[in-house]
Image (cartoon, helix red, strand yellow):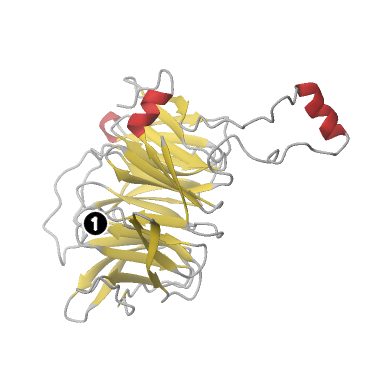
Amino acid sequence: MTEVHNFGVDAISCHAWNRDRTVAICPNNNEIQVHKRTSSGWKLLETLEEHHMTVMGIDWAPKTNRIVTCSADKNAYVWTQKEDGKWDQYPAWVLLRINRAATCVKWSPLENKFAVGSGGRVIAVCYFVSENNWWLCKHIKRPLRSTVTTVDWHPDNKVLVAGSTDYKVRVFSAFISDMEDAPGTTPWGHSNTLGTLLAEFPNTPNGGGWIHSVAFSPCGNKICWVAHNSSICVADATKGNAVVRLYTEHLPFLSCIWIGSNNIVAAGHSCMPMLYSVDDNGQIYFASKLDNTQKKEIAGLSAMRKFQSLDRQARNETNDNALDSVHQNTINCVRRVSDHEFSTSSLDGQLVVWDLKLLENSIAGLKIA
């Protein structure tokens, strides 16, 4: 059902996969480690060390085999692999022109540009200039009022969604006339001007919490997001930008992805991935916890004996602080690995790969379309 991988004792703050299942992780510092799976376990291929402060985001473009990273040092870099298989230790520079930390980064579907969110109330949409061998950017500023925490791309490569700490999710035109043909029409609208606001959604009518993660559905007609008030929301452009909100009983989620067109996997401070579904009426409902791990009780330890042991402060259990989950700390990143797999990384230092087909077979009544 799951594959649990450890890369050391450090927390993993973010990770990204290549199509050959090579993985790039940040061990909660200024480094990016590239690991490859071998018959004897994981092998560290490279450590990328150009950043001077904590890496905030990693994304790997599988078609062009380029890694983009951003950091609290206000910089972003694009890393390429040389012919000998080694990664270039002098990455292409990205001219971000921001005065606060770069907080998140995401490649576009065509991998010819990427978006960087920042603490300076700016989104930098970056594109390559071959004459100078660097990446330039154009800024989206208004009406952003606070730190941009998350970004995602529409499948058409010209529309961008962003969430921020002003409690709002916004959809922008990300069209760059210098390098692209005119955009077609989408349910969100279209514009020939970068930064045109196509839609705006408050997390709740009265504000809500910080937006932690946003994601376009595979068809691009829906957006889901999770926020710090333990809510999960879906906006549907085909229904007049109608928003459906669900206030959950769980601790706040930090990351979310779509699984198909009607299922969402979200994870965060509850330390396990949860599955939510959207029904035919557009309503969100909780489908299942995707982690059915259970603690192993010490043989012969009854409830009364357990209470007496705790009451005397003489614990008989060696794992009485363990959670009923694979992860033992906050999950901060959820990624797709393949059509039937997704992965989670956590502050406990574990990277876990979840197989959707095996989950369906192991959890009674679970159906993932």
The x, y position of residue 146, in whole percent, is: 49, 57
Would residue 108 be found to the left or right of residue 324 on screen? left
Picture quadrant where residue 354 is located: top left
Is 64 situated left or right of 351 in this image? left
Question: Which quadrant holds residue 301?
Answer: top right
For residue 341, side relative to residue 184 (left or right): right
Horizontal arrangement in the rendering, residue 319 relative to residue 16 (left or right): right
Helix, strand or loop at label 1? It is loop
The correct choice, above or below, for 29 with respect to 18 in the image is below
Q: Does the image show residue 199? A: no
Badge 1 is on which residue? 62
Q: Nearer the viewer, residue 206 or 286?
A: 286
User: Could you classify mark 1 by the number of other residues whose Cα lies within 10 Å: few (under 14), some (14-19), or many (20 or more)?
Assistant: some
Residue type at mark 1? Pro
Q: Nearer the viewer, residue 116 or 264?
A: 264
Q: In the rendered image, is residue 163 in sight?
A: yes
Give the residue displayed 16% in from the left and 80% down from the top: 131
Q: Give the position of the N terminus as an image quadrant.
A: top left
For residue 79, what is the image quadrant? Answer: bottom left
**Which residue is pictured at 64% across the width and 40% down the height?**
322
